[in-house]
Image (cartoon, rainbow, N blue to C red):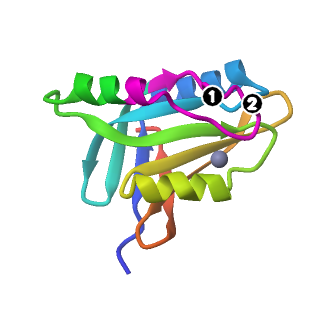
Amino acid sequence: MGKKMKVFFKDKVWKKMRKVSKDEFPNEAASLLVGRKKNEVFKVEKMIEAKNSQRSRISFQIDPQFLVDTLDKFEGMDMELIGFYHSHPNLHAFVSERDEKFMKLWPSRVWVIGGTDDRGEVTEVRAFVWRDGVEGVNVESKA
Ligand SMILES: [Zn+2]
């Protein structure tokens, strides 16, 4: 058993996470998390909003070209795609079956979920990673 991983957010990223979740409500918001990963710690420096091409309350899909463009953009900038964020409108921040399928495709990336209330305000943030199964990641602070 490895140590439990941690994820840190910059203050402005944390604010953006709350904003995009509310803006997209009642649909799921989806964003790419860019930053640095060192040992067991993810440091989120930037959040890049990806339009949820499905416009759905229960799922999201990120345009593959957008994903590739983002990977290209940060290559050589000492930053990388370290994870994904999506909201669960009016739901808890749990790992759905669908989430689990995506997580398996992107092992070692942090999967951050924001549960919102019935007005789209984020009330719960939880993070997970896939390492031989779903593992919880500590949401440490807004570093
Ligand atoms: Zn989900």
Within the image, what quadrant is residue 47 found in? top left
Q: In the drawing, what numbered circle is on residue 90?
A: none
**In this view of the protein, can residue 8 be seen by the observer?**
yes
Read off the magenta span.
Answer: 48-67
Q: Is residue 6 left or right of residue 31?
A: left
Is 63 one of the magenta-colored residues? yes
Q: Is residue 92 left or right of residue 129?
A: right
Q: Nearer the viewer, residue 128 or 139?
A: 128
Vertical position of residue 58 compared to residue 10: above or below: below
Q: In the drawing, what numbered circle is on residue 18?
A: 1
The residue indicated by pointer 2 is: 121
Neighbourhood count class around disc 2 (C-alpha, 10 Å): few under 14, some 14–19, many 20 upward? some
Name which residue lies at 39% across and 51% down. 109
Name which residue lies at 68% across and 40% down. 59
Mark 1–mark 2 CB contact (< 8 Å): yes
Secondary structure at badge 2 equals: loop
Name which residue lies at 51% across and 51% down. 102
Q: Residue furthest left?
A: 76
**In this view of the protein, can residue 95 be seen by the observer?**
no
Q: Position of residue 86 (x, y in %)?
A: 59, 38
* Circle 2: residue type: Glu
Magenta residues, dominant SS class: loop
Q: Position of residue 117 (x, y in %)?
A: 81, 37
Mark 2 Cβ and ligand 1 under 8 Å apart: no
Q: Earlier in the sequence, mark 1 or mark 2?
A: 1
